[in-house]
Amino acid sequence: VRIDLHTHSTASDGLLEPAELVRQAAAEGLDVVALTDHDTTRGLAAAAAALPPGLTLVPGAEISCGVFTAPGHWVSLHLLAYLFDPAEPEFARLRAGLRAGRDGRARAMVDALVADGHPVSWERVRALAGGVVGRPHVASALVEAGLVGSVAAAFSPDWIGTRGRYWVGKTEPEATEAIRLVRGAGGVTVFAHPFASSRGEIIGPAVIAAMAGAGLAGLEVDHPDHTPDARTTLRALAAEYGLLVTGSSDFHGSTKPQRLGAETTAPAGYQAILDAATGASPVTT
Ligand code: AMP
Ligand code: ZN
Ligand code: FE
Ligand code: FE
């Protein structure tokens, strides 16, 4: 059984339409795929409507949140939320607020670029984003304008890399608060790519301990941005705190190299998510 529990569509910063994403998931031989767009459930209906026979769709979202790792030092984190009730009002309000914040912050990054004479525009960034706007859309506008050679190159200190020259942070809830809201909507939470090497921030075990205390269900151990050492450490932390383990591609399309199913979740991890969820059910044909 091949299970990939972290993917993105055009509802956020992925390149494939939700319907095309589920078609490709089936073509890649996946049995279970979760659609986890940033701060939105918008792509789920189209993915469900186009679901190929034999493929199970797990409705989800990747929620922006963060933590203070030192006084005044806020680090952004991502929380995968699965099988929550999308209509539950408190969590729905959080997602709506995060989306509004993303618009304002992307605009602020574009304003700073324009102020320095760079040929980018909010209209173009907005057009590149079919749904929820993210830094990859600003990055694509920088590539189009010939300012950088690739999306990855835009994530540098000179451009929109975290704390970089044109980077603007977004307003995010504490990770523990986000976990409580997902649980309140009957959902299950997995800390996405906790030790992602490309993100440039160190997350200590204390952060995972605090999240576990708030009801975190699992850790995304097998992720393309995790080194073998990171995976070993995370597996041990999962065992220590009684957390389930997942592995997923974090597929976005060609802006990132990994293919659908590049990393997968063992059936036991998936079953633990199903057992803990009360807000929604997986979709099958
Ligand atoms: P945002 O949530 O808008 O700040 O943007 C984060 C998105 O940018 C996530 O999809 C990340 O995977 C992506 N991202 C972060 N760092 C990089 C990088 N170095 N190269 C390409 N994409 C990145
Ligand atoms: Zn993304
Ligand atoms: Fe992420
Ligand atoms: Fe992601």
Image: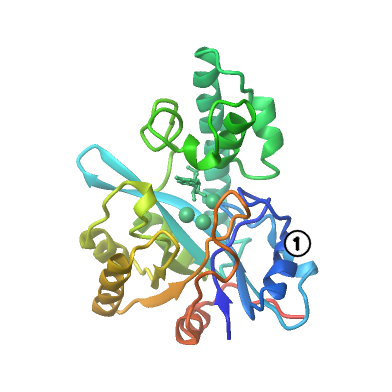
Would you say residue 281 is visible in this rendering? no
* The one of 8 and 206 positioned closer to us in this rendering: 8
Indicate the quadrant where residue 122 lies: top right
Q: Which colour assignment does the render follow?
A: rainbow
What amino acid type is highlighted by mark number 1?
Glu
- In the rendered image, the quadrant that contains the C terminus is bottom right
Q: Residue at x 50, y 86 (%)?
A: 267
- In the rendered image, the quadrant that contains the N terminus is bottom right
Give the percent coordinates (x, y) of residue 252: 59, 55
List the single residue furthest toward the front. Answer: 149
Q: Is residue 266 left or right of residue 61?
A: left
Q: Residues within 10 Å of mark 1 (few under 14, many from 20)?
A: some
Q: Which residue is mark 1?
A: 20
71 lies above or below 61: above
The yes-or-no answer for disc 1 within 8 Å of ligand 2 is no
125 lies above or below 19: above
Q: Is residue 161 left or right of residue 8?
A: left
Q: Residue at x 50, y 14 (%)?
A: 116
Would you say residue 151 is visible in this rendering? yes
